[in-house]
Image (cartoon, rainbow, N blue to C red):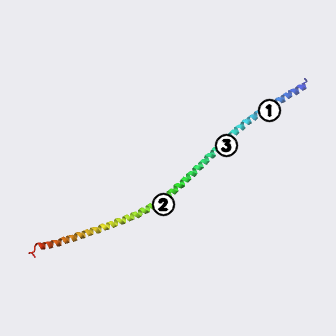
């Protein structure tokens, strides 16, 4: 081979080697890019799953909050109802207390009147006994008069 052809063949071989090295580097870069893309896709799927779980948890939390608000509204309504009933019961108790005080006052008046009548009866009975004693004494001792 002539030195020119050999140089050309050797140049071709160097060019092929460089091209091969370049293709190998491109292939390595492509493999690395595929690995990174696969890892990114896995990360994206994991992030999507995490987002879906968070949305589910958020929905559960909202439902729980709404249930809590409903329970609070019902409790407030029950409290208002019981407060109204308590007010009614206190008013009725006040009326009954006034009625009881009135009855106690009337009972005391009746007792005082009964004691007065009893005292009057005792006086009348005592006077009757005294007048009968005088009459009986007069009848028993006819010669004294």
Number of the label disc, if any, that sits on residue 48 = 3
Q: Residue at x 59, y 48 (%)?
A: 61
Residue 31 at what x, y percent from top left?
74, 34
> 10 Å neighbourhood of mark 3: few (<14), some, or many (≥20)?
few
Q: Residue 141 vs residue 121: left or right? A: left
User: SS for tag 2?
Assistant: helix
Given the current orientation, which residue lies at the most extreme bottom position? 145
> 10 Å neighbourhood of mark 2: few (<14), some, or many (≥20)?
few
User: SS for tag 1?
Assistant: helix
* Residue highlighted by disc 1: 23
Between disc 2 and disc 1, the foreground one is 2
Where on the picture, by quarter, is residue 130?
bottom left
Looking at the image, tell me whether mark 2 or mark 3 is earlier in sequence order: 3
Residue 126 at what x, y percent from top left?
20, 70
Whole-angstrom CA distance, mark 3 to mark 1, is: 36 Å
Where on the picture, by quarter, is residue 98?
bottom left
């Amino acid at each position: 081979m002539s030195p020119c052809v050999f140089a050309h063949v050797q140049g071709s071989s160097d060019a092929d080697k460089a091209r091969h090295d370049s293709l190998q580097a491109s292939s390595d870069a492509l493999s690395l890019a595929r690995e990174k893309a696969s890892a990114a896709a896995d990360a994206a799927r994991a992030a999507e799953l995490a987002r879906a779980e968070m949305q589910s948890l958020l929905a559960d939390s909202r439902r729980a909050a709404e249930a809590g608000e409903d329970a609070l509204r019902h409790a407030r309504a029950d409290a208002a109802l019981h407060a109204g009933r308590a007010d009614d019961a206190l008013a009725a108790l006040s009326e009954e207390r006034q009625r009881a005080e009135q009855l106690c006052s009337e009972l005391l008046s009746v007792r005082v009147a009964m004691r007065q009548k009893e005292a009057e009866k005792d006086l009348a009975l005592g006077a009757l006994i005294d007048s009968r004693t005088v009459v009986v004494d007069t009848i028993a001792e006819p010669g004294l008069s």
